[in-house]
């Protein structure tokens, strides 16, 4: 340390008269001390007040300049030195050195700036203010085609500098995107894919930039998909594959890039990884299996990429994914079920899949998870069944296959995501299926659970779906037994509340169901209608100018239907419905105005 103190004193003196030889030997001594014990030497350098003297040594003409920049790079490896480096005014002279043509000066300057920017707001702001990123980006643009080892070293440093400059900072990343660095870096990756350090630096930069939505368009205009797939195919090590995955995942959120990745052959790579790791027990095998299968599902979220892989249900990829469902691996079961749910996004695909026996595979999977109870697999398999049940021709086939019975096994689930999908699947299945609606609607346990979930205030989705299924059971069965089961289960008040929903479709479904209850068993429902203030709710719906025509129409139908009950009739009279209804005779919608005339006649006749 004595040598260090001596060198520091000399350097302080030398910086004023700049006797080059003595400066060189001082710098050598300091660099040696930094290599031996960076932290201690850095603290000593700061204490001795050397930093403010360094800007004068950073002259483009001086032969000492590369060593001074190297020393700053070493100092800035310490977090506590980055702020002082900025305060000492080192950034402007370092940025000036970026205009040098000396390779060693550029290399050490790039290192110094990169290290000062690392995790340092002050460093980044100072570089931003001095326009450093623009100069470095221009260097990369002019050098990227040169494959000489020294040049590749410089490119690695410059890419690292831009990465440290913009990491976790949206506005600086956006600045780099606007400078057009993405197309340059993609070309650079293609040319230098043999250079591990440079490739890794590119991948980390892509990973940072790809998080920004504005980058996706630029990435989509390059051949990034081909480059990444080509690079992925070469990799053997887990860590390298993971680095590429980290770029692929954010990029694959973009539909254009999804298709590019599919066309570049990424799916085949992912299927290979799955095949290699499915029986592996090492942590890295489990991680790769999850990442590959998740990415596969993500690619299927794009309509074009999904349809390309479906290939009319004959695609090898589609067939391979199907084989995941009976797998013993939960991750693959999950990915397989999610993939089916994604393939089931149009009627043609759904009809083909039901005709080729996929429903049975999903039911067997669900049966395995009644006991094992993996919630994510339950949720995914139910999602797939719900989507498959959308086309009308599939409903009866799926009901015959026993879908409703298997789904009902999950009625006791306490997990809202599973409850939500279970409800949606049953609602899709019974749409237009009177017999199934009758069967389910007279299932007391199901109706009891629905009424319970209609009060699930913490889970709006479950609450909404329960109400909709309750209404659907009545609307599609049109059965007195179903109506009785719903009344006995305490469901009427929830349907009245549903009629006040902010969603018009739900309001309408509720009103139609309530109309059927009134028509099929008004006597049994009377008490619940009074308790739930049905007449008052209908008055509000008819008075509200914002109510849609179908809401007004169905409200009037319901008014006529409840007139046969004495207590409800009295309520109708006390609320002066006739005034509201007579105004609706002039409504622009002919169906509404016609129903208003009929309702007015009914009210007048029974007043």
Image: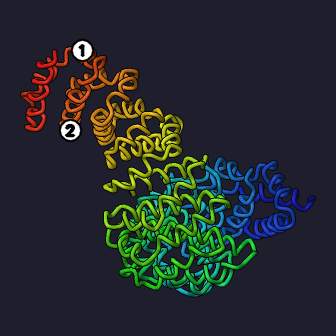
Residue 16 at x, y = what percent?
A: 71, 56
Q: Quadrant of residue 167?
A: bottom right
Q: State yes or no: discs 1 and 2 in contact (Cβ < 8 Å).
A: no
In the image, residue 16 sits, relative to residue 210, either above or below, namely above
Q: CA distance from mark 1 to mark 2?
A: 22 Å
Residue shown at the point (39%, 76%) measured from the top left: 355
Q: Quadrant of the C terminus?
A: top left
Judging by the rendered image, the residue that carries numbered circle 2 is: 550
Is residue 548 visible in this depiction of the protein? yes
Q: Earlier in the sequence, mark 1 or mark 2?
A: 2
Q: Nearer the viewer, residue 489 or 327?
A: 489
Give the side of residue 529 with respect to residue 226, left or right.
left
Residue 447 at x, y = what percent?
A: 48, 42
Name the secondary structure under disc 2: helix
Q: Nearer the viewer, residue 170 or 111?
A: 170
Q: Residues within 10 Å of mark 2 (few under 14, many from 20)?
A: some
Is residue 507 visible in this depiction of the protein? no
Judging by the rendered image, the residue that carries numbered circle 1 is: 575
In the image, residue 578 sits, relative to residue 495, either above or below, namely above
Residue shown at the point (55%, 66%) measured from the top left: 207
Disc number lying in front (1 or 2): 1
Residue 11 at x, y = what percent?
A: 78, 59
């Amino acid at each position: 340390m004595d040598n260090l103190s001596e060198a520091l004193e000399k350097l302080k003196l030398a910086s004023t008269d700049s006797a080059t030889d003595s400066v060189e030997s001082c710098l050598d001594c300091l660099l040696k001390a930094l290599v031996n014990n960076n932290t201690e030497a850095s603290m000593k350098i700061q204490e001795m007040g050397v930093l403010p003297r360094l800007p004068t040594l950073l002259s483009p003409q001086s032969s000492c300049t590369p060593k001074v920049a190297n020393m700053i790079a070493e100092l800035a490896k310490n977090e506590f030195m980055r702020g002082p480096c900025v305060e000492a005014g080192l950034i402007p002279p370092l940025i000036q050195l970026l205009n040098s043509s000396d390779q060693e000066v550029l290399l050490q300057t790039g290192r110094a700036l990169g290290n000062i920017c690392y995790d340092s707001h002050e460093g980044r702001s100072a570089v931003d203010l001095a326009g450093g990123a623009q100069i470095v980006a221009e260097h990369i643009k002019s050098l990227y085609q040169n494959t000489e080892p020294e040049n590749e070293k410089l490119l690695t440093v410059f890419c690292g500098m831009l990465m440290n400059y913009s990491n976790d900072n949206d506005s600086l990343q956006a600045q780099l995107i606007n400078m057009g660095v993405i197309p340059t870096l993609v070309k650079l990756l293609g040319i230098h894919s043999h250079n591990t350090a440079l490739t890794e630096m590119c991948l980390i930069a892509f990973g940072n930039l790809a998080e920004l939505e504005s980058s996706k368009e630029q990435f989509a205009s390059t051949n990034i998909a081909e480059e990444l797939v080509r690079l992925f195919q070469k990799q053997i090590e887990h860590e390298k594959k993971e680095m590429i995955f980290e770029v692929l995942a954010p990029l694959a959120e973009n539909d254009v890039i999804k298709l590019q990745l599919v066309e570049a052959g990424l799916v085949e790579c992912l299927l290979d990884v799955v095949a290699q790791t499915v029986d592996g027990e090492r942590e890295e095998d489990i991680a790769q299996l999850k990442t590959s299968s998740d990415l596969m599902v993500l690619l299927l979220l794009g309509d074009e990429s999904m349809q390309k892989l479906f290939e009319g249900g004959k695609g090898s990829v589609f067939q391979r994914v199907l084989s995941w469902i009976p797998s013993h691996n939960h991750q693959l079961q999950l990915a397989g079920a999610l993939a089916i749910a994604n393939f089931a996004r149009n009627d043609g695909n759904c009809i083909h899949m039901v005709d080729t026996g996929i429903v049975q595979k999903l039911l067997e999977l669900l049966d395995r998870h009644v006991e094992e109870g993996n919630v994510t697999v339950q949720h995914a398999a139910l999602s797939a069944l719900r989507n498959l049940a959308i086309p009308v021709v599939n409903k009866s086939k799926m009901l015959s296959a026993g879908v409703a019975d298997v789904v009902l096994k999950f009625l006791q689930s306490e997990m809202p995501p599973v409850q939500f999908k279970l409800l949606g699947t049953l609602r899709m299945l019974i749409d237009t299926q009177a017999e199934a609606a009758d069967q389910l609607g007279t299932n007391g346990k199901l109706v009891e659970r629905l009424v319970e979930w209609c009060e699930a205030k913490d889970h709006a989705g479950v609450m909404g779906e329960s109400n909709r299924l309750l209404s659907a059971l009545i609307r599609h069965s049109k059965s007195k037994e179903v109506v009785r089961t719903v009344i006995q289960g305490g469901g009427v008040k929830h349907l009245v509340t549903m009629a006040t929903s902010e969603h018009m479709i739900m309001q309408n479904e509720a009103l139609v169901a309530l109309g059927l209850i009134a028509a099929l068993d008004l006597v049994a429902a009377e008490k619940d209608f009074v308790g739930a203030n049905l007449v008052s709710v209908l008055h509000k719906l008819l008075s509200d100018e914002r109510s849609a025509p179908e809401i007004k129409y169905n409200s009037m139908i319901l008014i006529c239907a409840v007139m046969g009950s004495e207590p409800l009739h009295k309520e109708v009279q006390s609320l002066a419905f006739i005034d509201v209804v007579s105004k609706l005779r002039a409504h622009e919608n002919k169906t509404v105005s016609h129903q208003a005339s009929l309702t007015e006649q009914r009210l007048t006749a029974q007043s």
